[in-house]
């Protein structure tokens, strides 16, 4: 099989950026290096300008999402019913905006971030600011690293964002959207999915705890954004968890004695799946997302089989909730939301 030089170059940029993001985060002794690497993975596109645009949308969405996360905790954290109602309303508005907007990715990030702030600080509200701050810092760091790496070796283009983002288009985002019945139905389904996940968490106390709720929101918005099939998403992520993340976490990582070995292993793994991404994006995204999110790489590395099982179960349960709702209430047929 002939090696695609362009795909190989993109895979190298991705692998180098992920390795550098982990190296820099660990060097600075940040507690959430996974968000830096995740930002690199999720904005990695074929051109520098496209990646930078998506990175800016991710930063904007993170800022807005962290703000609303703090707002919900400040005014509604004392009552479950109030929390459920205000978050469901917020999710409905974000889902509608995501479908009507020219920049759905920014709405997507702004939509799920408040739920991450809430779930990661549940019963530990004092940690909310700490989580929000590091989430923003490490997301910005990952985007900056990938932008620099993408622009220097083998630059893909020299275009700017002026044609893609302008003041008029941004102002239109802040006004209102024409009422669309299809958008309303999809938004209601997304909010209903969240409510089912929230009630399921309250009455069953599932593995992963409140994370099941935030993951339900993330996957329901992800499916709406990209028109994914929940069943296939469940299969890909479960396979990636146990065939990629588990061996890396339980077999390779405990045998590594130095940071250089760890960074080299991350680079190699990212390079391999980054190249497979030229065949299908899911071959890049699913394995690397599960690897980044489930290994919990830090300077104070710990290994826990129960923690890994909880993460796996939370993923399975959250996507299963989305799948069940989709089977009961099918969404109207719609094209994939693309940055226009």
Image: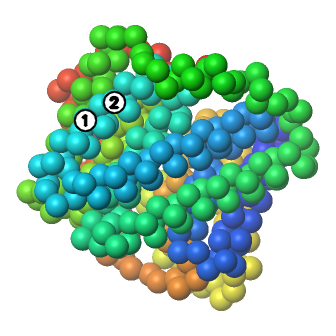
Give the CA distance from mark 2 to mark 1: 6 Å
**Can you say whether 169 is above or below 107 in the image?**
above
Q: Quarter of the image containing the N terminus?
A: top right
Q: Nearer the viewer, residue 113 or 9?
A: 113
Place of residue 259 in the rendered image (x, y in percent of width and height, measured from the top left): 69, 81
Helix, strand or loop for disc 1: helix
**Can you say whether 149 is above or below 33 in the image?**
above
Place of residue 280 in the rendered image (x, y in percent of width and height, measured from the top left): 61, 35
How packed mark 1 is, by other alpha carbons closer than 10 Å (few <14, some 14-19, many 20 or more), is some
Q: Are marks 2 and 1 in contact (CB under 8 Å)?
A: yes
Q: Quarter of the image containing the C terminus?
A: top right
| Residue matched to label 1 | 89
Q: Residue at x 49, y 26 (%)?
A: 174
Q: Residue at x 59, y 47 (%)?
A: 59
Please tell me how many numbered marks the rendered image carries. Answer: 2
How packed mark 2 is, by other alpha carbons closer than 10 Å (few <14, some 14-19, many 20 or more), is some
Q: Residue at x 54, y 19 (%)?
A: 172
Lateral position of residue 340 relative to residue 210, left or right: right
Residue 196, numbered label: none
**Can you say whether 38 is above or below 31 in the image?**
above
User: Which of the 4 image quarters holds residue 330?
Assistant: top left
Place of residue 331 in the rendered image (x, y in percent of width and height, measured from the top left): 29, 20
Lateral position of residue 310 relative to residue 19, left or right: left
Place of residue 278 in the rendered image (x, y in percent of width and height, measured from the top left): 70, 37
Q: Nearer the viewer, residue 87 or 313?
A: 87
Q: Is residue 295 visible?
A: yes
| Residue matched to label 2 | 93
């Amino acid at each position: 099989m002939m090696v695609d030089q362009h795909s190989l170059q993109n895979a190298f940029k991705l692998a180098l950026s992920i390795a550098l993001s982990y190296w820099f985060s660990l060097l600075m002794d940040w507690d959430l290096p996974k968000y830096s690497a995740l930002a690199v993975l999720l904005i990695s596109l074929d051109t520098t300008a496209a990646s930078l645009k998506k990175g800016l949308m991710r930063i904007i969405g993170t800022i807005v999402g962290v703000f609303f996360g703090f707002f919900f905790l400040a005014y509604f954290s004392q009552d479950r019913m109030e929390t459920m109602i205000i978050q469901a309303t917020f999710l409905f508005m974000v889902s509608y905006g995501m479908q009507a907007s020219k920049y759905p990715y920014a709405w997507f990030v702004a939509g799920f971030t408040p739920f991450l702030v809430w779930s990661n600080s549940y019963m530990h509200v004092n940690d909310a600011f700490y989580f929000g701050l590091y989430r923003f810092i490490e997301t910005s760091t990952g985007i900056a690293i990938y932008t620099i790496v993408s622009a220097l070796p083998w630059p893909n283009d020299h275009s700017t964002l002026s044609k893609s983002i302008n003041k008029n288009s941004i102002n239109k985002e802040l006004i209102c959207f024409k009422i669309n019945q299809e958008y309303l139905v999809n938004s209601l389904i997304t909010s209903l999915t969240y409510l089912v996940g929230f009630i399921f968490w309250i009455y069953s106390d599932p593995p992963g705890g409140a994370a099941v709720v935030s993951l339900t929101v993330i996957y329901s918005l992800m499916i709406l954004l990209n028109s994914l099939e929940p069943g296939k998403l469940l299969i890909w992520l479960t396979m990636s968890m146990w065939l990629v993340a588990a061996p890396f976490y339980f077999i390779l990582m405990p045998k590594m004695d130095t940071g250089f070995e760890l960074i080299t292993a991350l680079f190699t793994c990212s390079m391999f799946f980054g190249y497979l991404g030229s065949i299908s994006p899911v071959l890049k995204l699913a394995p690397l997302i599960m690897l980044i999110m489930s290994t919990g790489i830090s300077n104070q590395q710990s290994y826990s089989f129960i923690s890994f099982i909880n993460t796996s179960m939370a993923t399975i349960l959250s996507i299963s909730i989305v799948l069940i709702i989709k089977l009961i209430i099918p969404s109207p047929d719609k094209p994939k939301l693309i940055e226009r």
